[in-house]
Image (tube, grey):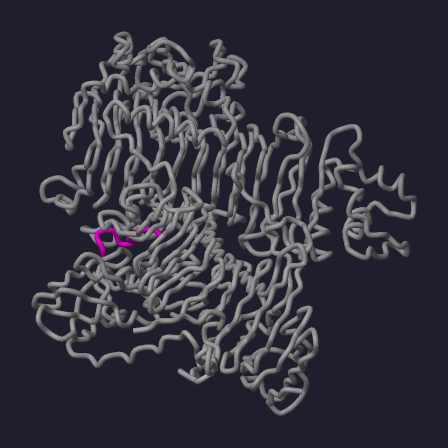
Amino acid sequence: MAEFGIKGPLVGSTVSAQIRTRSTGRALLDIDQTNWGVIPEEPTPPVGATLEVDVDLGVVHPIPFSAFGGNVVSASIVEQPEAVPVHVSVLDGNILINSVDWPEVRQDTTRKKDENGKDIFTLYAGSDQDDVTFNPLTYMVNKKEKSAPGFSFTFRVLVTRSGEDPVTVKVTATPVAHLTLSGWSAGRGYKLAVDENDATLLEPGERHADIYVSLSAAAYSKDDVISEIGSWLEVGQVEHYIATQLTPGGGNVSGHEVAYNPMTYYGSQAKPFLPDAVKGIVSELLNSHGFDTVYLHYERGYDYSAVPKAFAAFPGGQGILHPNAILAWGEGDQPVMYRTFINGSVKKHGLILRDMAFTFPSEVGGGGVSDLLVENCTSLAKIYLYGQHLGEVPRVTVRNCILPQAFDPSEVKDGFWPGNYRPSNLKPGGGCNGIIIQGNFIAWGGAGPEYLNTLGPDGVPSKDDTYGYEQIGSDPRWGLNGFATPGPNLLTHPIYFDSFTRHILFRDNFVFGSGGSLIQLRGGAVMRQCAFTYGNQAFMFGQGTFDNYAPTQFPDRADGHRSLGQDVVITHAGFMDGPNAGNAMNWGLQVSAPLVPLERCLVLHDLNPNDPSDASRLTSDWNGDLHNRADGLVYARGSYGSGAPFEHWKGRERDIAISWGEQTYNPDGLDLSDVNDATIFRWYDAKRGNAPDTTTDIMEIYWWLREHEGPEIQALVRDFIAFMQAPLGIAPAWRTSAGPCSFVPDLAEDGCRWDNPNNWGGDLIPGSFAADTAALGGHKVFFQDHTLTVAGLDLGAGGHVHAVNGRLNVSAAPTCTGGGAITTDESGQVWIGGYVGTAPLALTVKGGRFANTGTFSGPADIRIDGSTDPHGVAEFLCAYGEASMTIRSGRSMEIMGGGPRVGFDGLDGAQARLSFEGGAELRFVAENGRLATIREFRSGVNGTQATDVVSSVDLGGAALVLDLTGVTAGSHVLIAADSVTGSFGSVSGAIDPGLDATVAVSATSVSLTVTAGSGRIVLA
């Protein structure tokens, strides 16, 4: 049979053509087809059977084919669940039900009381709804039931049994309590795109100002400005004058015209300002002149810590993609700051602190900020956040920082360190949620190794002893002028997470030294590629609590998120003793939560096996007792002992080895003959070019690591872990070139996250090379943490990629079968090279950004609402650069409220086009009386470069649907472009009584005018 192809017609267009013979012109075939290339949807087969199942909430739960009865040879998803955040897919003889991230929490748990004084827990999902039965998790907790039948959902599966016709099975699934109530984290947190050097990309708002600060002789005071400008300028008007210089078109100040001067304004690099006045300048720009973002730059090489109010921190911005920032400029050492402490009863959202040095006595953080990103800072100050369980989800990220100690001599009392002294370097706060800690060197907290045990009044070692603050000639790098550090304390930890935690990612960190735990991690966390050394305790994967300090909800369940440990090394115990040290001198890893997978986790050498003298540390330097040598891996007796709730629920152990104290645990039978080569001392000597075992002093390694720049730590951590794994033969053999990657959910782990190599066959995640391709196989995959580029993305049959942070770039147009979905959320971004498929695509922009960079002509339903950005902002670039988007017949674009930014951006005069077909719908829904505008806007991805595109919108006869509820009389622009062509086929919607709305189309805009009237919406 002859075959031929036709190229050129767009998907969905009407095609009329005729094929004729060349010689006679006789017609062989007439073609007259609408919806060219669109495959009609198959009608849903009638239900032939039903199935009721219970599914664990918050995880990817498998239902085996055998549950359908008979010999099932294949199954496919016919219909996804509706109105619930659940996705269904097929894998290896199982139906997978993914309810991870239900509910998609925007506000965290708050505690209330019922009429009997009993705690009621409420999870909010971006609304004011205060209903204890709003989601299955809170229903189960408040009802004290492990099932939520009121939240059952249905979906349909086409099942084929051997020798039988396919039958459609309607499945009714009821959520039940998982062994860990909160299930797996989707990886939420505050992570913006990064550049090739792993530095966060700063994206200024549309109205943006940079203010430069210095202590140099050239820096200006207010009086200096008045001296140059003239005495007519009053001191109280200097901030207004500077803001006017930065306002396009200038303005009038005290009767004098002030020109726009974006290059040499007061506060520019040419005319930096002294720090004591910058707070007023920033406040004027943000609060009185309508600037969206302000970056405050402090000149390097100066110590600002003694200047009162030198640090002006104003959280905020144009959505959390565009936060305000405090940065460094010039050459030299990081500017030294005393304090940035942000309080307030209502949190403000969006602040980057980068390239700063904070000194003691000081504190960074506070209770009035969320969406805080601390990057490449050096801090002797405590980074503390408070009240994190109240109000908006806090979202705090600390990355690529050096946090080497947290003890402060100003807190010494009467010549002694306090007995309960326990500051941490980093404490995300009670009720912390959305915390990312990565690439940091974090050490010591409120204890140090050069401490002095001072005997109490009885003159013998006892619990009334103290740690004296006396001159002992301690290392001057502590900054203590030779005085003693505080000593070990059971309650001091470099990192302290409270019991209630959600969405914790801890990766690529080197945690070094503690007189207590190296990290107090009571709730669930995902931990990857981390090193721990020289602590009296390492850490525990704990059970967490449902709410801050709340009791356990069910005795046979853990309350927090699931935990995971991949590529973790613990080595060289502390053995530091003193009156407050407790009985933990050398604890390794403890597990008290169920189903914690451990992969390539090593707990090696509480003592240096290559230095016999290290055994002297077994004798207490306080009371002379001989220390017991604890085990390196302990499954807590209360959780895993005989008859305990998780006795039979250990997680998967793979390629782990414990050689610690008297314990050797080697479940996979690894070759341990060279295990003594795996020491931190031999790693350090190899790095320094020394002969093995030249170094025996662990503190020499500490001081060396401490002197590195923050961005260098990640590479050092990975190098150290690979060095420790090599003698045991478990270092991963990662691929070294691009290739195809297929998502195969690892059900022993999360089974749904892009950042987990075990969901990609145990190899590097796609995007590790820009030429990688990713096939999701119809599954739902949460994208987080990274900035990655893939050459292609195949969603498969009904697949869904959901970006909660980070940025995913897809160079080509993605593909899918039968349908697919892309969602951006909070600070997540997805950029795609168009879409030309025939299957419908669902695009949902709750926060972050979606961007189209190619030809987008396939069918798609689009909703942009900004519901998970605390500013209500979300960005949808219909066309970035030379790109086009067509909303096809039968499909819609819906824009909620006035927060979303929708339209066009790019450079170099590129043609950026949005088109609608007849039968398509464009919907605007007012929220709080506000509507968005489709327009050109500067997204910030090109910094402060102005948008330079030729934008066009073809209305194409589409239907315009308006919900103008709450909109008052006045005018509004719905569309603004260089060219607007065509017309709307119809205009309809809702409007408050007593008002009329008129829509007018011009050559460059679509405008809306609301006047007094009788409830009509008409087209002019």
> On screen, 423 above or below 172?
above
> Which image quarter holds the C terminus?
bottom right
- Tell which of 158 and 80 is nearer to you: 158
Q: Is residue 453 magenta?
A: no
Residue 860 can be seen in this image: no
Q: Position of residue 668 (x, y in %)?
A: 15, 32
Image position of 374 (left or right of 180): right
- Tell which of 844 and 546 is nearer to you: 844
Q: Residue extending furthest bottom?
A: 1014
> Which image quarter holds the N terminus?
bottom left
Question: What residue span does the magenta drawing correspond to?
Answer: 178-186
Q: Quadrant of residue 333?
A: top right
Image position of 83 (left or right of 18): left
Q: Position of residue 987 (x, y in %)?
A: 57, 85
Identify which residue is drawn at 26% across, 52% down. 745
> On screen, 339 above or below 280?
above
Q: Position of residue 69 (x, y in %)?
A: 9, 68
- Tell which of 930 and 427 is nearer to you: 930
Q: Position of residue 1014 (x, y in %)?
A: 62, 92
